[in-house]
Amino acid sequence: MLIYIYFQLIANLTFFRGEIATRIISTARELEIETFSVYTTNDTSHTLNASHSIQLTSAASYLNISELVEIARKYNIDSIHPGYGFLSESAEFAQRMWDEVGALVIGPGPEVLARTGDKLQARILAEECYVPVLAALKPPTSDVDELANFASSVGYPIVIKAVDGGGGRGIRIVRKTEDLASLARLALRESLSGKAFAEKAAIDGFRHVEVQV
């Protein structure tokens, strides 16, 4: 009987950081997987049941790929659970962990993430698969005036989406001109690249059908 010993880093990257990390750690304990949780000052509740805890330099470290790669290398981590949103959607994160550490990021591989982690690339993929899509502003922009011009051309409501913002936090529905600037800035703030695109919003008289793989 061959026994594999896994050393798993719980990358606490989610909006509900403590809740999701705690679930992952509890499951890992049931499977007798040794875990390393990462934390920052005043963000430690999720570490209680982890085998080991590693303090990060700052809250920004949760999104610092180089720092997380170095931690994985230092502690011989062989798998990473990134939660959802943020770096869980980053092809670069998954690729660097594999290339530089030999650690597997649990979830889609970098090739899949390159087409789906970025919302605009996911839209392009849908078009390639002949999925009907709504009118959109492409390419992504950080210019609020461009977003306003798009809204004027297609009519309200529109939805502004941070290109690489996760967990739904980078999505804002705009119903009128006077709300656009403030909502656009909120969406842009959730984007790692500082860019967003916009689509005509299908919200009134439509049903939301979501498929997740």
Image (cartoon, helix red, strand yellow):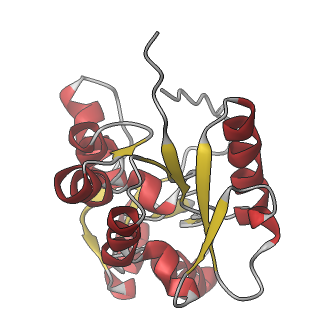
Whether residue 33 is situated above or below residue 56 in the rendered picture:
above
The answer to which image quadrant residue 129 occupies is: top left
Q: Position of residue 176 (x, y in %)?
A: 62, 74
Q: Position of residue 25 (x, y in %)?
A: 70, 47
What residue is at 61 percent from the left and 86 percent from the top? 178
- Asked whether residue 49 appears in the rendered view, the answer is yes
Whether residue 88 is situated above or below residue 189 in the rendered picture:
above
Q: Position of residue 189 (x, y in %)?
A: 50, 83
- Asked whether residue 190 appears in the rendered view, the answer is no
Q: In the orientation shown, which residue stands out farthest toward the front?
A: 1
**Front residue of this view, candidates 56 and 51:** 51
Whether residue 30 is situated above or below residue 45 in the rendered picture:
above
The answer to which image quadrant residue 151 occupies is: bottom left
**Front residue of this view, candidates 51 and 17:** 51
**Front residue of this view, candidates 57 and 93:** 57
What residue is at 67 percent from the left and 29 percent from the top? 31
Q: In the orientation shown, which residue stands out farthest toward the top?
A: 1
What residue is at 60 percent from the left and 28 percent from the top? 209
